[in-house]
Image (spheres, rainbow, N blue to C red):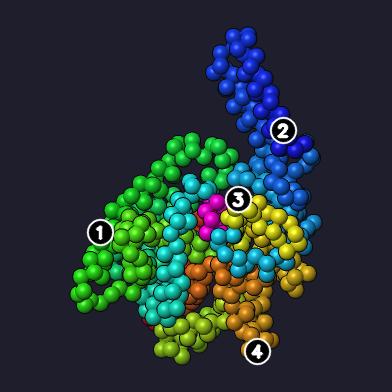
């Protein structure tokens, strides 16, 4: 049954009903209500016709209502994506979600797609739509890209100069957010890692003293926590219910309240810096992302307005903090689950840092090759999402793929990174966890060592995306995680409580998630002076 034909039939029936209502004196409001119910039921039942002749995954029969497949995806996305990949890993398939049907492509299409301009295929709109569209809290990123441009142009090339600031914030967090641990102490590791990462992100993004301002931190942390839950909630209901959920969901109220509070703190700082820029006074410019955004924008444009810059900054801190913290927590869980790697990575950290007087520098971070390998293997087994390379077709006429498939305007498409990197025909011994997998590959490929780094993307490792629009923060994330993991290994012994083991990841939609309440035992070792 085709959705288009069904809609036409419904329209004819609706007109007929409305006509006869005047004859039999049925109140028009009842007729309109009946039509509305019929339309909603049809949208929940029939598969829509996207115009793409590609098989669907997740339907148990051709007559199964669409909403059942959507519900099934919410709780069984992992098995559905895996099923589709096994059947059509060299071509395409579709899945039905509450936010519409999503086209999942093989990695064979990467060369065709990865450098298409955003006017045709948008990565940022792919991110926004994937997390709830206009209700995701990410909408401003689709209008103004100054934050991303500033990060790419000013932060990533200058990470070496930011090492001391990042370490200073790490030390501050260890003093502030972690118990003394003189004896074995129970620590909720994920919330701790989240706070460390968030503090480093804020130091890099807004600088001192604002990054330690209690009002700013309360607003920024509260916004990040609540907007994340709101995004998952919006993905868990049909699109027509999102306006109602937005009005009723406490997490939605809270993230908006925290956004307003954060703006109240940040807007005066933007204005102060803007005044200094235009005054001609010689002053020491802060070395942070906010300063770069102020310098790159015109105060007369919407993009350069203090309110715009403040909201962009709050949004970007939320994205950077939660994603890096999740990956870092998985690394710690995987290390403690495989204690044979702890001494290995601890020895590497000590030996490497001794060459730079126990200081974290770009040189010493690059020298942590075994740790880098372990991080990449942990990411391969514990991705933040089972779907990556998120895109939305923005070309009004749609796009045509290399095989002639036409993809209409507005279609969401993506690639399944976890399925690809777990495929034994793509990666040797893909089902096993080998923490030195990429360290060994770097040794086997002299001159090609950078191909196998944590932050490097290729057609097998797509967790950070691929091509020109790959995740801009991956290099900073790599540096942060190495600093945190190396410091913890050198200063603490870490283990699971007796009888406990690594918790199994749960899933909702395509997002694996850890048990954030998992506790580890930590005990301070003879301190290694990492500064």
- Residue 475, given in percent of the width and then of the height, sits at 50, 74
User: Quarter holding the N terminus?
Assistant: top right
Q: Which residues are magenta?
A: 121-131
What secondary structure is marked by label 3?
loop
- Residue 161 occupies which quadrant of the picture? bottom left
Cβ atoms at labels 3 and 1 below 8 Å apart: no
Name the mark nearer the viewer: 4 or 1.
1
Q: Residue at 40% x, 52% y: name it.
A: 223
Mark 1, residue position: 268
Q: Earlier in the sequence, mark 2 or mark 3?
A: 2
User: In the rendered structure, which disc, 3 or 1, sits on the residue that comes first in sequence?
Assistant: 1
Task: Work out whether mark 2 precedes mark 1 in sequence or the reverse, and give the earlier one.
Answer: 2
The percent coordinates of residue 371 (x first, y second) are 56, 77
Relative image position of residue 317 (x, y in whole percent): 42, 61
**Closer to the camera in the image, 16 or 133:** 16
> Is 75 left or right of 123, judged from the image as shown?
right
Dot 3 crowding, Cα within 10 Å, few <14, some 14–19, many 20+ = some
Q: CA distance from mark 3 to mark 4?
A: 44 Å
- Residue at 73%, 72% (x, y): give it: 427
Is residue 86 among what the camera can see? yes
From the viewer's perspective, is the residue at label 2 or at label 1 nearer? Answer: 2
Which residue is drawn at the image coordinates 71% and 37% (left, top)? 3
Give above or below for 303 relative to 369: above
- Classify 81 as above or below 287: above
Query: Is residue 463 toward the left or the right of residue 490 in the image?
Result: right
What residue sits right under mark 2 in the picture?
6
């Amino acid at each position: 049954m085709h959705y288009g034909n069904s809609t036409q039939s419904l329209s004819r029936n609706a007109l007929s009903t409305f006509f006869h209502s005047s004859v039999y004196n049925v109140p028009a409001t009842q007729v309109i209500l009946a039509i509305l119910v019929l339309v909603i039921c049809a949208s929940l039942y029939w598969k829509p016709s996207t115009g793409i002749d590609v098989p669907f995954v997740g339907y148990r029969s051709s007559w199964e209502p669409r909403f059942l497949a959507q519900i099934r995806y919410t709780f069984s996305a992992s098995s559905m994506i895996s099923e589709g990949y096994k059947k059509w890993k060299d071509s395409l398939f579709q899945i039905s979600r509450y936010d519409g049907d999503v086209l999942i492509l093989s990695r064979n299409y990467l060369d065709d797609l990865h450098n298409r301009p955003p006017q045709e295929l948008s990565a940022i709109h792919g991110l926004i739509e994937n997390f709830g569209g206009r209700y995701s809290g990410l909408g401003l990123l689709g209008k103004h890209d100054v934050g991303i441009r500033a990060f790419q142009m000013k932060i990533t090339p200058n990470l070496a100069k930011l090492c001391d600031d990042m370490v200073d914030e790490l030390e501050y967090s260890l003093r502030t957010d972690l118990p003394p641990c003189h004896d074995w102490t129970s620590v909720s590791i994920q919330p701790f890692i989240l706070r460390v990462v968030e503090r480093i992100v804020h130091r890099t993004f807004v600088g001192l003293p604002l990054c330690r301002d209690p009002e700013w931190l309360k607003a920024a942390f509260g916004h990040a926590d609540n907007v994340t839950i709101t995004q998952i909630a919006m993905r868990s209901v049909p699109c027509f219910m999102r306006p109602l959920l937005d009005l009723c969901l406490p997490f939605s109220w809270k993230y908006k309240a925290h956004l307003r509070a954060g703006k109240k703190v940040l807007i005066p700082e933007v204005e102060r810096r803007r005044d200094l820029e235009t005054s001609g006074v010689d002053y020491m410019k802060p070395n942070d992302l906010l300063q770069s955004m102020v310098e790159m924008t015109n105060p007369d444009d919407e993009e350069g307005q203090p309110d715009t810059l403040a909201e962009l900054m709050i949004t970007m801190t939320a994205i950077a903090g939660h994603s890096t913290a999740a990956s870092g927590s998985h690394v710690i869980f995987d290390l403690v689950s495989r204690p044979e790697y702890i001494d290995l990575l601890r020895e590497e950290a000590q030996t490497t840092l001794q060459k730079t007087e126990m200081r974290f520098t770009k040189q010493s971070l690059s020298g942590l090759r075994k740790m880098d390998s372990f991080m990449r293997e942990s990411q391969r087994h514990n991705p933040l999402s089972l779907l990556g390379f998120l895109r939305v077709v923005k070309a009004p006429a749609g796009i045509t793929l290399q095989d002639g498939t036409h993809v209409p305007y507005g279609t969401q498409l993506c690639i399944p990174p976890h399925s690809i990197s777990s495929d034994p025909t793509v990666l040797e011994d893909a089902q096993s966890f080998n923490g030195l997998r990429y360290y060994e590959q770097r040794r086997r490929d002299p001159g090609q060592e950078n191909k196998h780094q944590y932050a490097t993307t290729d057609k097998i490792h797509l967790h950070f995306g691929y091509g020109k629009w790959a995740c801009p923060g991956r290099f900073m994330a790599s540096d942060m995680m190495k600093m945190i993991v190396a410091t913890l290994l050198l200063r603490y012994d870490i283990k699971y409580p007796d009888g406990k083991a690594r918790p199994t990841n749960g899933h909702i939609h395509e997002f694996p998630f850890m048990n954030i309440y998992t506790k580890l035992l930590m005990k301070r070792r003879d301190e290694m002076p990492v500064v």
